[in-house]
């Protein structure tokens, strides 16, 4: 089985990759289109030069890598906005799609810690909604995952047709061998973790209300389709 996990940044996407990566039957992949996305858009992201040097920048080459059949199961972590105009999507055929979502107020606050300038494209709610409309799949709100990790992961595995493996609940601190080079900038907190954090506090307020208003309709639309217990 090939699982393509789509999200924007700061959606517990790395923790989910570690969760699946701790299964002995599953190989994981970390944002394989990142370098191709930077090359295509010319955007100046943290560690841009190192990212461009670490991965293929030809989208067709990346698509060929992503389309290869896994030995048993694979979990590919993808950012929705990396599928910029002109990026191929035919390689996604036959895969199972999982869309991870998080309330945009939390995404904006978390992303703002790492970058001073934020656009709607950066947090990718519109891009993710467009991918869901095209590809379909399962939706998981990571707030529900944090509230009940085992129950939600069991439900997800049942929907995917994967046997439950309790190894998904814990992983070693310090990162994963599949981490992209950008982990040094983005993954500090998850590298210190060994499992899913608990329930978050109240929603943050007053940070980029313009972005929040733009993102909320997309989040609400996906939230209405998310897995429940």
Image (cartoon, grey):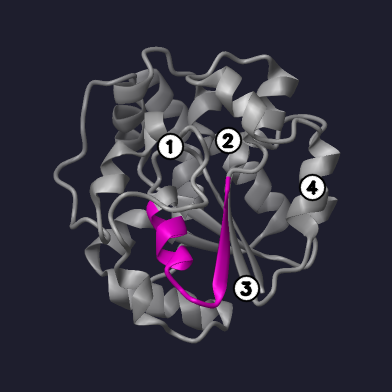
Q: Does the magenta-highlighted stretch encompass residue 155? A: no
On the image, the x and y values in percent for residue 82 come to 64, 35
Q: What is the CA distance from the residue labelled 4 to the residue labelled 2?
A: 22 Å
Which residue is rendered at x = 27% and y = 21% of the image?
207
- Helix, strand or loop under label 2: helix
Q: Earlier in the sequence, mark 2 or mark 3?
A: 3
Q: Residue at x 23, y 21 (%)?
A: 206
Which mark is in front, 4 or 1? Answer: 1
Residue designated by label 1? 183
Q: In which quarter of the image is residue 86?
A: top right
Mark 4 or 1, nearer chain start: 4
Sequence-earlier tag: 1 or 3: 3
The residue under label 3 is 73
Q: Which of 224 and 129 is in front in this view?
A: 129
Residue marked by disc 2: 126
Are the residues at dot 4 and dot 3 in contact (C-beta closer than 8 Å)? no
> 94 above or below 166?
above
Question: Which of pointers 4 and 2 indicates the residue nearer the eye?
Answer: 4
Residue visible at 18% across and 49% down in the picture: 200
Check the image and report above or below for 194 versus 207: below
Residue 89 at least partly seen: no
Residue 150 seen in the current view: yes
Q: Residues within 10 Å of mark 2 (few under 14, many from 20)?
A: many
Point out the stretch of residues depicted in magenta: 15-30
- Quarter of the figure with residue 141: bottom left
The 10 Å Cα crowd at callout 4, few under 14, some 14 to 19, many 20 or more, is some
Tag nearer the camera, 2 or 3:
3
The spot of residue 55 in percent (x, y) is: 67, 35
User: What residue did someone put label 4 on?
Assistant: 63
Which residue is at 72% across, 21% downward?
39
Furthest residue toward bottom: 163
């Amino acid at each position: 089985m090939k699982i393509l996990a789509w999200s924007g940044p700061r959606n517990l996407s790395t923790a989910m990759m570690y969760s699946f990566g701790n299964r002995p039957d599953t190989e994981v992949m970390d944002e394989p289109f990142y370098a191709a996305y930077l090359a295509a858009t010319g955007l100046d992201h943290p560690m841009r030069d190192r990212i461009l040097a670490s991965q293929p920048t030809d989208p067709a080459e990346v698509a060929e890598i992503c389309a290869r059949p896994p030995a048993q199961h694979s979990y590919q972590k993808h950012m929705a906005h990396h599928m910029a105009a002109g990026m191929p999507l035919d390689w996604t055929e036959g895969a199972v799609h999982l869309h991870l979502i998080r309330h945009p107020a939390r995404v904006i606050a978390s992303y703002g810690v790492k970058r001073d300038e934020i656009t709607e494209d950066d947090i990718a709610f519109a891009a993710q909604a467009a991918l869901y409309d095209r590809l379909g799949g399962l939706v998981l709100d990571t707030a529900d995952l944090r509230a009940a990790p085992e129950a939600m992961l069991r439900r997800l595995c049942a929907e995917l047709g994967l046997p439950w493996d309790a190894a998904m609940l814990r992983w070693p601190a310090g990162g994963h061998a599949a981490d992209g080079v950008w982990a040094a900038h983005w993954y500090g907190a998850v590298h210190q973790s060994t499992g899913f954090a608990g329930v978050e506090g109240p929603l943050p307020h007053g940070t980029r209300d313009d972005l929040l208003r733009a993102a909320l309709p997309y989040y609400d639309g996906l939230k209405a389709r998310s897995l429940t217990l």
